[in-house]
Structures are given as structure tokens and as C-alpha cells.
Image (cartoon, coloured by chain):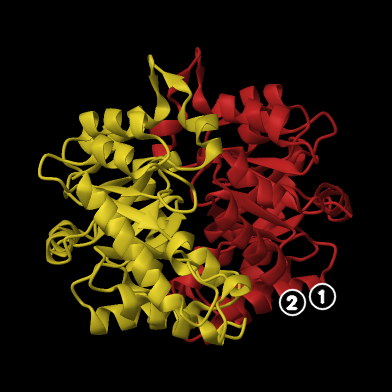
Chain colours: A yellow, B red
Amino acid sequence: MSFNEKLKLAWKKNNSLVCVGLDPDLSRLPAGLAPQRESIFEFNKAIIDATHDLVCAYKPQIAYFSACSAEEQLEQTIRYIKTNYPDIPVILDSKRGDIGSTAQQYAVEAFERYQADAVTINPYMGVDSAEPFLTYQDRGVILLCRTSNSGASDIQDLVVNGSPLYEKVADLVANQWNKHNNCLLVVGATWPEQMAKIRSIVGDMAFLVPGAGAQGGDVEQLVKAGKTEDGTGLIVNSSRGILYASSGRDFAEAARNETLKLRDLINQFR
Amino acid sequence: MSFNEKLKLAWKKNNSLVCVGLDPDLSRLPAGLAPQRESIFEFNKAIIDATHDLVCAYKPQIAYFSACSAEEQLEQTIRYIKTNYPDIPVILDSKRGDIGSTAQQYAVEAFERYQADAVTINPYMGVDSAEPFLTYQDRGVILLCRTSNSGASDIQDLVVNGSPLYEKVADLVANQWNKHNNCLLVVGATWPEQMAKIRSIVGDMAFLVPGAGAQGGDVEQLVKAGKTEDGTGLIVNSSRGILYASSGRDFAEAARNETLKLRDLINQFR
């Protein structure tokens, strides 16, 4: 089954466009979990068990694992999802990008070592840097287009032939890089106008939308700007807003409540 | 000591602009080394011992380690260089780039976990994605500008206000992002004309130059295009051309010979 097919089934099954981002920050682990890498899997497992029926995807952010030598905990986390909740796709957020021979190694990292269903990558180096990922036709390749951070404008808004660079990236991905129909785009929740424009360029291509939680993106605006005609097309990620909803022993329950709130809020505007 | 000072001393000490890229590909390890991750450190150590007096830097490419779960071998390799050849800077080639809070984790990965002297990063997400790296003022931050691969032109050549995007990136880095004087740029050996233009934009800022070896960049052209007035300014990387110069048990000696040849060829044109 392709990533896009798996995603569609998950949207439907859980009636949800919410993705929970797994960014386990040792300095923010809740009460009862020691701030050490051995706690990471336990934390992730509790979050996953509490939210699996409310989400369309999980998105572990590899940086939080790499910074504290927790590759094993990342492997364990993904294996846990795939074993216990096989209908929920896993997006490895790693934003890799390199020349072809090196990108090949990164594709092995994401798709073979970690067994991710999809991976985020950076388009700056061009199509040959994406190709080793794209050839895994059953996996999703999610290219940065308009990111959620404030500095996104520094490069992405530079004007190319009368349009901002991110629109050119959207156009290239949709019309040249998407031969196997496995491309998606990262479009930040914080930029609803830009999102609407990108939607008009790329048709029904799904967007991974970071920035809806702690980063403050407005849910009504983003859903209206980004949804496709059938009310899907979006993977709306929240990480910190869900993971750290409570710093007490009730963190998993609090995470469930936040996920439910976000799901229902999104569903109002689909 | 800052990265740039350390680099200047290494250029001088070994009279060399050559950087050996450590891309340990298990499928290409020479005779006598089993194709398994336990061989990686042994391979790197032999290459390093054979070339340490001929180089200005080593550049491990993290993808080759991550693909085969060899993080420990990467740590060991960098520790070996820093213990035995402390004058030679280590550049971690990882091309990271993410929003600030995540970039902070990647900075910890590069500079604290792996203790790299410098790291490569991708500028597409803007200055706030670079900031967590830039605040390590004694480390080098090497931003992708014009990469060596054929697809580099897809995005990097798009015309912004009459100039290609990579020139705009060079200008932004030199005039806005380089407050702590710790920025460098990646400029591929395969594009000498573009390199000359970038040199004219950024003054004496050092370039990491991939593509001189297996990728076929012309050494005379690149050195003339990229050197600074004092005949330095370049970190000319060769990975596969040196590492796999021989597939026999004489691989380290062959690597030394290739490094020496490249060093002397470069020095003819400085």
C-alpha cells in the first residue's frame, strides 16, 4: 500500500487530521519519568497509547533523539507503533538533503533502518537529492515548501519571476518531482494565505502542517486555506502543545484531551 | 580558539588545502576489512593515520554512519582525531536545518555529542534555523550555497532580482548571518565561474569545496576561482577518490598517495 493510501485510511478511520509530533525533550519530561534517555520510549509509548485512536499519523523528530544518543529509543518507538497500531503511518521528521550518493544513505536510514512510512526532506539541492527517496514508491516524501518559523521568509519569500520561491518549489514538486505520486509538502500553519496559494498550485497533494500548537497557527484559517474538496489533504501536527500539556503524572490523559480538542476543532471547519 | 583560527593554522602547518571526506561505505571497504560496522573505525583510523600530515581538515559524512547504525563509530572516529591530531579540525557534514527549537537539538548533536569543530547546514529555512548553531562562536557553521551536484541548478539558479538564488544566499550569509565571524559556505568544485562570483561577494570567507575528486571538478580552475589573496580560503574535499584509491590491503598507502597528489596539484595554483 502506498503512503498516500495508508494516510487516507487513517484520516477516515479516526476521523482525524491530527498528527502528534514526538519531540521527547529530556528537560521537559513529566513527573515520574527521570530525565534520561531510558525514559524516552516509556514517555512516547504512554503518549501513543493515549492518542492512537485520535490521530492520522505520528511524527518523531529525529533531532530530539540524536541530541541525546537515543537512536535505539527511536527505533523502539517506531517499532511499537507499527506493531500495535499498524494503521497509523509514521513520518520521520529529519529534513535531510544531500548529493545523490549520500541521499541514498539517508534514504536507507529513514526507510530501512527506521522503517518510516514517510520522511521530510529539504529541496534546496535539487531533484537529484530527492531521487533516492522518491524511488521508494510506497513511501511518502515530504518536501519543505513554506515552513512555519518566522525566518521562513528570508529565503522562501525571495521573488522568482514575480512569485515567491516557495511557490516555485511547490510547482516543481507537483509537476516534475512527483512522478510516482508519493510527494507531499510542508506548509506551516502560521501562513494561511500562502497555504491557500500553494493549494491552488498543487491540486490534492497532501500537506504536512506544523505550527498549529505551540507555534500559534490559527486552526480555522489553516483548515479553510489548506483542505481539499473532500475535507482532507492535511496532516496537522502538534508536538509540544500535546506532549507537555501536563507536567504531572496525568500527562498522557492531558495529551489525549489536547489531541481530542484539536481534532474536534479541526473537524468543525473541514 | 575559533574554527577559522584553527583552520588557518592547519592550512599553514600542513601546507595543504585538502580535506579528506570520511564516507565509509560498507560495500566498498578494502580487502582485509569485513563489510560490517565494526570495521568502520578501523578503516577511518588507517586513513587518518596515513594522511594527517597532508590535510587541513577531516569531514565525516554522517549519513554513511547513520545508515548502518554506526553512531558509536562516528564518535570514536572524531575522538581519535581530536586526541591524536588535535590541530586538524573536524567538520561534521550533516546539512541539518529546522525551526529554532529543533535546530538547538541538532546543534547539541553536532557540537556536544560529536564535538565537531564545524558543521554543514542548509539555509532554506532562514536565519532563525541557523541561529542555534551560530551562537557557538568557537565553532564553524558552513552554509550550503552552490552545491556540487548536477541538480543544484533546480533551485539554486532561480533568478532573484536579476541574480541567481545562490548569490543572494552568499550575500545574506556574509552581510547578515555572520555576526560572530564563524560562517563559511559550501561551493562545489564543479562550478568555477559561480565560485569566482561568490568569492567577489563574500570577501575572505572560507569555502568548503566538495566535488574535486570522484565528482570531477577541475582543480586548476577551482583554485584560481576560489582562493583568497593569500592563497588560502579553500577546504577542498575529496572523499571517494582518496578512500577507495585501492581496494587492496594497501588502501591506506594509496589514500596517502592520492592525498599527496591532490595537495601538490592544488598548491601549484595557489
Subunit that carries the residue with mark 2 = B
Where is residue B2 shown, x and y percent of the image?
85, 51
As helix, strand or loop, the secondary structure at mark 1 comes to: helix
Where is residue B9 shown, x and y percent of the image?
88, 52
Residue A171: image quadrant is top left
**Residue B35 in sight here:** no
A173 with respect to A87 (left or right): right
Give the residue at x 45% y 72%: B28
Where is residue A154 shown, x and y percent of the image?
55, 31
As helix, strand or loop, the secondary structure at mark 2 comes to: helix
Front-most of residues A244 and A38: A244
Front-most of residues A123 and A170: A170
Give the Cα separation between the discs numbered 2 and 1.
6 Å
Subunit that carries the residue with mark 1 = B
**Amino acid bearing label 2:** Tyr
Rendered image: mark on residue B84: 1
A259 with respect to A199 (left or right): right
Give the residue at x 67% y 71%: B113
How many tags in the picture?
A: 2
Residue B21: image quadrant is bottom right
Question: Looking at the image, do the residues carrying marks 2 and 1 touch, with CB atoms under 8 Å apart?
Answer: yes
Depicted B64 relative to depicted A183: above or below: below
Give the residue at x 38% y 64%: A258
Near mark 1 (Cα within 10 A), the count class, few <14, some 14-19 or many ≥20, is few
A44 with respect to B52 (left or right): left
Give the residue at x 66% y 71%: B47
**Residue A61 in sight here:** yes
**Amino acid bearing label 1:** Asn
Front-most of residues A218 and B212: A218
Rendered image: mark on residue B80: 2
